Amino acid sequence: MDADVIIVGAGAAGLSCAVQLSDAGFTRQLKILLLEPRTEYTHDRTWCFWNVLPNPFEDCVSHRWRTWSVADQTRRVDRSSPGLTYDHLPADVFYDRAQRLLGADPNVELRLGVRVNEIEQQGNLVRASTDNGEVMARLGLDSRPRPVVDRRRPARDRRCPRLLQHFHGETIRTDADVFDPSVATVMDFRVSQDRGIHFIYLLPFDARTALVEDTYFGDEPRPIESYAGEIADYVITQFGVDRFEVLHSETGAIPMDACPAPASDASRILDIGIRGGAARPSTGYAFLAIQRNAAMLAKRLTTWAEDPTLEPPKHVPHYSDRSAFLDRVFLSHLVRCPERAPEMFLAMFERVPPDALARFLFDGGSIFDDLRVISALPAAPLVAETVRLYGPRNPPR
Ligand SMILES: Cc1cc2nc3c(=O)[nH]c(=O)nc-3n(C[C@H](O)[C@H](O)[C@H](O)COP(=O)(O)OP(=O)(O)OC[C@H]3O[C@@H](n4cnc5c(N)ncnc54)[C@H](O)[C@@H]3O)c2cc1C
């Protein structure tokens, strides 16, 4: 055996699980090996989230906004709440911190430049085949991203609506003071809605510098130039600026899937991260759910490590059944009526108290938070959607 646990893919979930396992004392006796194909880490993304969950990376947050807004052609809604912030964590800072924490643990090894081609269970062991040979362990955590499925294919069941959140963002610097650095714009729908649900996400770091992200909830990614053109149009229209320098860019596609692919059925291979269903189907947010899941998994694996005669822990779902049900109805409605998205999101931000909404978005709230969100949304279409999905005349295909 090369290690007790192998972690396939050392991105957000792989590194977070390793940090939590080390922190929980798992590596006092046992060894973790992370296998990651990239040879160096870069600032390839930024993570943002409301500060509703303590996590080991809190002090890597580089920027915090106390007010956030959503807007459409008719109005802008600004929200804030004492103590609640929208936090920005740059990926390079996260990767550095995780590597430093893991580097201090002699029982954790991070092997860069190693791609895993296959991972399978053989009896009570797990075998990963890589370009550099085979690796054996007692348990595997797999975070390899799945291929982005073609969202234009019909979902396998009407109860499995799905969209793809695809986006490109540019951190730009203008030569005039145009941004209000005190407000993060989480959704600005004042852009064309002709190609589906479309908004701009704007994080201003100071009066001249902001991350401007052109985002769709749609079906397939677009060419980078097309997002870049829309960012330029937005900056001209909303801020009257036609020249800016691009300091950094990031591109992504996140599944918004009410029925993420089923977890591996091998009892010693657990899917983690987006592969394990971390992306919230109705929003695409994943970072905090990854942190919560890593902490839970570390606890269970550490208990198992103390008595290896126990069966290894099973897949830990990222979201509750209650939130899965609500997401299914909401997403199904968005898929069928994308033109209603601006109205729905504005209503949610306008009518739900910010703390309750932040907890709800991370599935960390109570049933009362859920009820507040439900009662903020137009009732008739969502009831009709529920009947469409679950009514007696509509059994699943
Ligand atoms: C640009 C961008 C911005 C985002 N912003 C936010 C945000 O603001 N808030 C939020 O909540 N979520 C955000 N997300 C969504 C989500 O939090 C991230 O995608 C997050 O990185 C997912 O973590 P993960 O571990 O599942 O995947 P990743 O972090 O992508 O890690 C997967 C790892 O697997 C490795 N890998 C790939 N193939 C193999 C292989 N064959 N063998 C071994 N390893 C392999 C990859 O190199 C990678 O390191 C964003 C996503 C992107 C792409």
Image (spheres, rainbow, N blue to C red):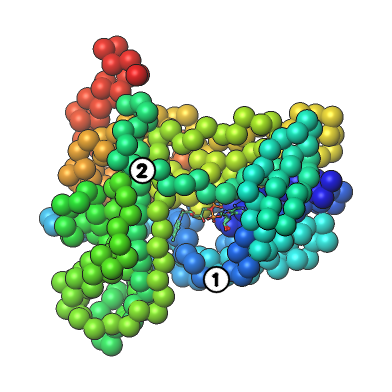
Q: Is residue 82 visible?
A: no
Q: Position of residue 281 (x, y in %)?
A: 40, 41
Q: Tell me the amino acid under the disc marked 2.
A: Asp
**First-in-chain label (2 vs 1):** 1
Q: Residue furthest top?
A: 392
User: Which image quarter is the C terminus in?
Assistant: top left
Q: Tell me the amino acid under the disc marked 1.
A: Thr
The residue carrying mark 2 is: 150
Q: For residue 356, what is the image quadrant?
A: top left
Which residue lies at the image location 28% right of the left edge and 88% below the top edge? 175
Q: Measure the C-alpha gap from mark 2 to mark 1.
A: 28 Å
Q: Position of residue 189 (x, y in %)?
A: 21, 56
Q: Position of residue 96 (x, y in %)?
A: 63, 69
Q: Is residue 385 visible?
A: yes
Q: Residue furthest bottom?
A: 175
Q: Residue furthest left?
A: 74
The residue carrying mark 1 is: 42
Which residue lies at the image location 22% right of the left edge and 48% below the top edge? 196
Which residue lies at the image location 68% right of the left edge and 55% below the top edge? 131
- State the residue in front, 12 or 387: 12
- State the residue in front, 265 or 365: 265
* Rendered position, 161 above or below 72: above
Instruction: Answer left or right for 322 relative to 182.
Output: right
Mark 2 within 8 Å of ligand 1, using the beta carbon: no
Q: In this rendering, which labeled residue sits more in front, label 2 or label 1?
A: 2
Q: For residue 37, what is the image quadrant?
A: bottom right
Which residue lies at the image location 19% right of the left edge and 28% below the top edge? 380
Instruction: Answer left or right for 101 relative to 144.
Output: right
Q: Within 10 angstroms of label 2, few (less than 14), some, or many (20 or more) residues?
A: few
